[in-house]
Image (cartoon, rainbow, N blue to C red):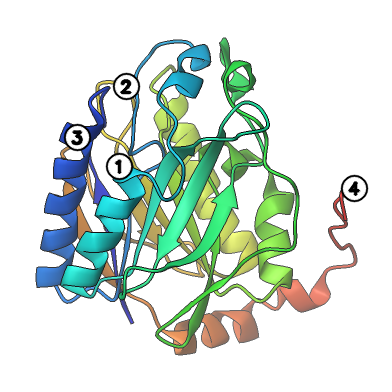
Amino acid sequence: MRIASGQFSAGTDPQRNLQDVRQLMTTAARGDAELLVLPESSLYASNEPASVLPGVAQPLDGPFISAVAASARDLQLPVVVGTTEANPDGLPFNTLVAIDGSGAVQATYRKVHLYDAFGYRESSGISPGAVDPPELLMVGGLHFGMLTCYDLRFPESSRLLLDAGADVLLLPAMWIVGPGKEDHWNTLVRARAIENTAYVVTANQTGPLATAYSIMVDPFGVVVANAGESPGVIFCELAAERIAEVRVRVPSLLNRRFRVVPREL
């Protein structure tokens, strides 16, 4: 199947962000993508403390996701996009929303590991998602699992998705700039692909706040597409045969002697 990743720099104007999202969706559809992955925090992004996020959060039937869903329906393009989801019981969630080609919400993922690192406290404005059984997407004969940004630093989250049947890991992100951060990004994305013998498809935000360089990595750890620094869309062909070939050569999933058992489960 043909997958696309779109990167851009979201700001504090949700309507402007929506315009950028629609442009990336149109480009992906014209490139015959069967699924487009967009960054974390596509609704709203800034260098403000996370405490501002409850004031900008929207429900999943609010204007932002509803507009993305309408574009998905018009373009017949499934899309995964990051938003700040209003939570009537407390602080909002950092949520990924998977929308199918008819405009219906197919699955969601609420970020489990909050970015309380590098001097930032995401938990001051966001509730952590529960560790529930993963909701996988089925597109083009492949199963997709979703992670968000800081989850990349926790290999057990990726392995949980593999155990649930994922062939491809989708990683929307807003990987904040800083010393060593680009190197961490590339190293960790490739590591998750190599150790799980799975594709990893990322969609990062661009500068000035984030590092850009959205990459797509095959199950052997080969970077097959790189978006560089500028906003835009990249494409990659995913093949079940490639996954099977690598897993015969490197049967690490069969050879392991440990399993992931989340405390919440």
Decide which of tag 2 and tag 4 comes sooner along the chain: 2
Q: In the rendering, at what x and y percent does residue 194 appear? A: 57, 62
Mark 1 or 2: in front is 2
Q: Crowding near pointer 2: few (<14 within 10 Å), some, many (20+)?
A: some
- For the residues marked 1 and 2, what is the alpha-carbon distance in whole angstroms? 13 Å
- For the residues marked 2 and 3, what is the alpha-carbon distance in whole angstroms? 19 Å
Residue behind mark 4 = 263
Picture residue at 65% right of the left edge, 30% below the top: 127
Let me know if residue 214 appears in the view. Answer: no
Q: Cβ–Cβ below 8 Å for labels 3 and 4?
A: no
- For the residues marked 3 and 4, what is the alpha-carbon distance in whole angstroms? 39 Å
Secondary structure found at label 4: loop
- For the residues marked 3 and 1, what is the alpha-carbon distance in whole angstroms? 24 Å
Relative to 187, 174 lies left or right? left
Residue behind mark 1 = 213
Secondary structure found at label 1: loop
- Amino acid of disc 4: Arg
Mark 3 or 4: in front is 3
* Up-down relation of residue 234 to residue 73 (above or below): above
Picture residue at 44% right of the left edge, 30% below the top: 57
Q: Crowding near pointer 4: few (<14 within 10 Å), some, many (20+)?
A: few
Decide which of tag 3 and tag 1 comes sooner along the chain: 3
Q: In the rendering, at what x and y percent does residue 107 appear? A: 53, 64
- Amino acid of disc 3: Gln
Decide which of tag 1 and tag 4 comes sooner along the chain: 1
Secondary structure found at label 2: loop
Residue behind mark 3 = 15
Let me know if residue 197 appears in the view. Answer: yes
Q: In the rendering, at what x and y percent does residue 207 appear? A: 25, 26
Residue behind mark 2 = 209
Picture residue at 50% right of the left edge, 53% below the top: 190
- Amino acid of disc 1: Tyr
